[in-house]
Amino acid sequence: MAINVSRDLEAEVEARVRRGEYNSAEELLRDALRLVDERDRLRVAIEQGAAEADRDELLDGAGVVAEVRARIRERRAGGA
């Protein structure tokens, strides 16, 4: 597959490879795509959180900490 990019972008990719940040342009592209996927997952999580907030389904901080501590105690006791 051939990809056409601007000269500025090509220079940026070459500079990052030359500095040793990436072993190749392909490696940089893989990393960039991984970051795009991560951003997309984060966007979905934010949208889900916003919808939960709209439905008043959020837990307060103390409630979350208490729930996590209860799960830890349960696992230590061999319950999960």
Image: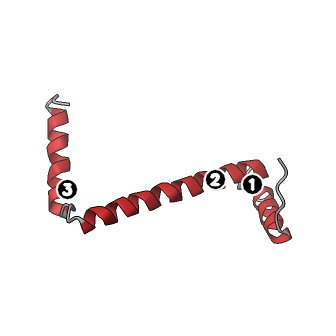
> Do residues under tags 2 and 3 come within 8 Å of each other at their CB atoms?
no
Residue closer to the observer: 25 or 50: 50
Q: Residue at x 19, y 56 (%)?
A: 64
Residue closer to the observer: 71 or 56: 56
Cα separation between marks 2 and 3: 33 Å
Residue closer to the observer: 59 or 76: 59
Q: Label 1 crowding class (10 Å Cα cut-off): few <14, some 14-19, many 20+?
A: few
Residue 61 placement: quadrant: bottom left
Badge 2 amino acid: Leu
Q: Label 2 crowding class (10 Å Cα cut-off): few <14, some 14-19, many 20+?
A: few
Q: Earlier in the sequence, mark 1 or mark 3?
A: 1
Which of discs 2 and 3 lies nearer the camera? The answer is 2
Cα separation between marks 2 and 1: 19 Å
Q: Earlier in the sequence, mark 2 or mark 3?
A: 2
Q: Which residue is mark 1?
A: 20
- Left or right, 1 with reference to 54: right
Q: Residue furthest bottom?
A: 8
- The image quadrant where one finds the C terminus is top left
> Do residues under tags 2 and 1 come within 8 Å of each other at their CB atoms?
no
- Left or right, 76 with reference to 43: left
Q: Which residue is mark 3?
A: 64
Badge 3 amino acid: Val
Q: Which residue is mark 2?
A: 33
Cα separation between marks 1 and 3: 42 Å
Number of numbered markers: 3
Q: Position of residue 39 (x, y in %)?
A: 52, 59
